[in-house]
Amino acid sequence: MRLHRVADPVLRAPLENRGGVGVTPEAHGLLALSRISPKAIRALGRLTPPR
């Protein structure tokens, strides 16, 4: 992953008055899910990892 691919959105966020910036595909997916269904994100947070 190139540095600019991460640095550009992070440095642009304060200029656009954004608190959080998703950089990876997983972050984009979870951000979209949190906007669609915040309850689903809270349920994912309560899951215990497999041992």
Image (tube, rainbow, N blue to C red):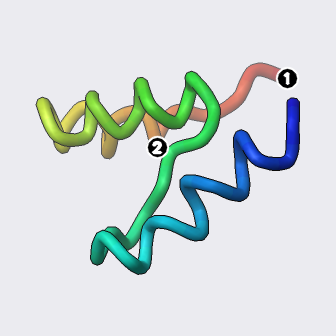
- Above or below residue 26? Residue 13 is below
Instruction: Give the label, 1 or 2, closer to the camera.
Output: 2
Of 1 and 38, the residue lying toward us: 1
Amino acid at the residue labelled 1: Arg
Neighbours of disc 2 within 10 Å: few (<14), some (14-19), many (20+): few
The one nearer the camera, 34 or 24, is 24
Q: Which mark is residue 33?
A: none
Q: Position of residue 14 (x, y in %)?
A: 42, 79
Point 35% across, 39% down: residue: 31
Compare residues 39 and 19 and report the one nearer the observer.
Answer: 19
Quarter placement of the C terminus: top right
Q: Residue at x 60, y 41 (%)?
A: 23
Snapshot quadrant of residue 25: top right
Q: Residue furthest left?
A: 36
Structural crowding at the residue carrying mark 1, measured as other residues with C-alpha within 10 Å and reported as few (<14), some (14–19) or many (≥20): few
Helix, strand or loop at label 2? It is helix
- Number of marks: 2
* Residue ID at (25%, 40%): 34
**Quadrant where the image shows the N terminus:** top right
Q: Earlier in the sequence, mark 1 or mark 2?
A: 2
Q: Are marks 1 and 2 in contact (CB under 8 Å)?
A: no
Q: Is residue 17 above or below residue 30?
A: below
Q: Disc 1 designates what residue?
A: 51
Which x, y percent locates residue 44? 42, 33
Q: Position of residue 29 (x, y in %)?
A: 41, 24
Q: Is residue 9 left or right of residue 44?
A: right
Q: Which residue is mark 2?
A: 45
Where residue 35 appears, x then y in whole percent?
17, 40
Q: Label 1, label 2: how many angstroms apart (C-alpha)?
A: 16 Å
Amino acid identity at mark 2: Gly
Label 1 sits on a secondary structure element that is: loop
